[in-house]
Image: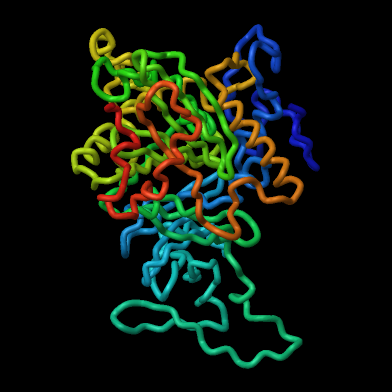
Amino acid sequence: MPALQLARPLPARRGGQSRSPGRRAPEVRRYPGRRTGQQRGGTMVSTRENELLTQTDPGTPGGKLLRCYWQPVALSEELPAEGAPLPVRIMGEDLVLFRNESGDPGLLGLHCAHRGADLSYGRLENGGLRCIYHGWLYDVHGTCLEQPGEPSNSWAHSGGRDSMQSSTLEAQTAERSRPFHERIHHTSYPCQEVGGLVLAFMGTGDPPLLPDYEFLTAPDSHQWVTKTHQECNYLQGNEGNIDPVHLSFLHRIFTPESDAAFTANDTCPTLETEETDFGVRIYAVRKVGVDRQYVRVTNFMMPNLAAVPGGRNGYNANWHVPIDDTHHWRYDVRLTLGRPLNPEEILRGRAETDPPYHMIRTKANRYLQDREEMKTKTFLGMGHAFQAHDKCAIEGPGPIQDRTQERLGYTDRGIVAARKMLLQALRDVQEGRDPPHVLRESPAVPSLVVRAQIIPAGTGWRRFWEREDASLDPRCSSDRSTMGQIASCTA
């Protein structure tokens, strides 16, 4: 694939060179004795392409691409009514998230437009967020409503607490400039809240429609969402979702029950990829005895989201949102189909986390790997939580994986297809076109189906999932749903 041509190419980066004054370049794991970009087996990205795919700061090609889409910036539970403003860092931008007195979320630049004070310490009052330094007041749109220290404003005391009220400005002549506060528009991004997530559009122009994903719009009784901190570039996490073969090894649990039995028995499944309107559909087909086959359909949704079969009667959607180039948040949305969530499932989901939203197993404690457990219980020796397994695997290559050193093979077909689509999307954005899955006319995503199922050998598995589509929506009545079959591992 030819290298992406950009109007303003990124300068070549040397080891240790700063990206900006006072900021060290992220570490890229390299391997001595190998030539960068040397071909060894499968299709690999070049050094240049790896930078384009992994850099997401403002102004970078990758950052512009991710900003074409709505991105999660927090869990709704992190922003309770009358709760403190929440400092967040998303794609290299320092921001503050708050909920006004009407309950509307707002996402603003962290530092006050006046003299840079940290707005996360601000007061929530008078319909907005007030800076503690000089009292400037901002609404959720970044409009500066008040500047009480300026001559055209006055301080008033009422209702048992201090509040600020702007005096009525006299009529301005055409020659006079607008009032100072009207000339201030602080950095702000539109937000919406759905499915337990606060999402923001951090791009330019009109926001696209938010896709009508069933895992966001399903009843609360069928959906649960959390997040975990990952110490590596977002792409490493994203690519882990679309690699079906690692299920036979990394996540293997030594028990005849569950999907693990099928993924362990056939460690070399047939793999097929298919481009769709939302991204890439990935089929993994494993033999089960002589007359059956186990089919898993995984979906990569542009640009940093995947939906993967998970256990019985449901699936997981994993959203990997950059904090910066060397850290990201993994948002996990668990959807159950045909039945409500079991409280035990939620407890299991929280068992491996240490508030606030960090995994107990980390690189610092070697993920608490248990060598005795590896002998009789699990392949990895890190318990049964797939999130912990994935964290170990994706953080291993370092903060930013050097993809020029990979040896890609047949098992990497999904990853190759996703990278190809991402690189083309970068070109689209550079040339002024909407990338794939930016929705303008309808939010519907009818072709998104996640399934794991045993079917008879010889059945046409490429289209088996199209049957019964009308009853796949968890928003339909549960007695009509075939969701119990979607992730079932029983004949």
Where in the figure is residue 373, as x and y percent of width and height?
24, 13
- Which residue is found at the position 57% from the left and 82% from the top? 151
* Residue 34, image quadrant: top right
Number of numbered labels in the structure image: 0
Q: Is residue 117 above or below residue 319?
A: below
- Which residue is found at the position 31% from the left and 59% from the top? 80
Coloring basis for residues: rainbow
Which residue lies most toward the bottom here?
Answer: 171
The answer to whether residue 329 is visible is no
Quadrant assignment for the C terminus:
top left
- Which residue is found at the position 71% from the left and 50% from the top? 433
Where in the figure is residue 487, as x and y percent of width and height?
33, 34
251 left or right of 321? left
Q: Is residue 261 above or below residue 486?
A: above
54 left or right of 163? right
Q: Is residue 365 above or below residue 297?
A: above
Where in the figure is residue 447, as x and y percent of width and height?
50, 45
Quadrant assignment for the N terminus:
top right
- Which residue is found at the position 32% from the left and 43% from the top? 482
The answer to whether residue 70 is visible is yes
Which residue lies most toward the right here?
Answer: 7
The residue nearer to you, when weighing 342 against 94, is 342
Where in the figure is residue 6, as x and y percent of width and height?
78, 39
